[in-house]
Amino acid sequence: MFKDLFRHAARHGLVRVEAAERWLLYRDNRNRTAHDYGKDFAEATLRLLPGFIVDARALADAIEEAGDG
């Protein structure tokens, strides 16, 4: 369901396709947290965080703009 949501958002221009692909990556990483606690995984997650913050702000702005329309 989560992945479908972002595919639809990209299809309808709420997010760019590249951003939707990153959101799918963030979700996959989040799902792995239940199974992987190693140092390499933690470092990989930390590398994703700056992009996640940018994408989360952009998504919040897009949702707000869509609500104003």
Image (cartoon, helix red, strand yellow):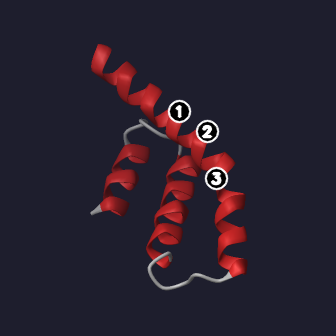
**Label 3 element class:** helix
| Residue name at image x 53 percent, y 70 percent | 29
In the picture of the structure, the residue carrying the numbered disc 2 is 54
Residue type of the residue flagged with mark 1? Ala
**Label 2 element class:** helix
| Residue name at image x 68 percent, y 47 percent | 50
Mark drawn on residue 58: 1
Horizontal arrangement in the rendering, residue 38 relative to residue 63 (left or right) = right
**Label 1 element class:** helix
**Front-lying residue, 58 or 50:** 50
Expressed as whole percent of the image width and height from the top left, the position of residue 17 reads 53, 49
Residue type of the residue flagged with mark 2? Val
Horizontal arrangement in the rendering, residue 32 relative to residue 63 (left or right) = right
In the picture of the structure, the residue carrying the numbered disc 3 is 49
- Looking at the image, tell me whether mark 1 or mark 3 is earlier in sequence order: 3
Residue 43 visible in the picture: yes
Residue type of the residue flagged with mark 3? Leu
Residue 69 visible in the picture: no
- Looking at the image, tell me whether mark 2 or mark 3 is earlier in sequence order: 3
> Which quadrant holds the N terminus?
bottom left
Contact, mark 2 vs mark 3 (Cβ under 8 Å): no
Expressed as whole percent of the image width and height from the top left, the position of residue 2 reads 33, 60
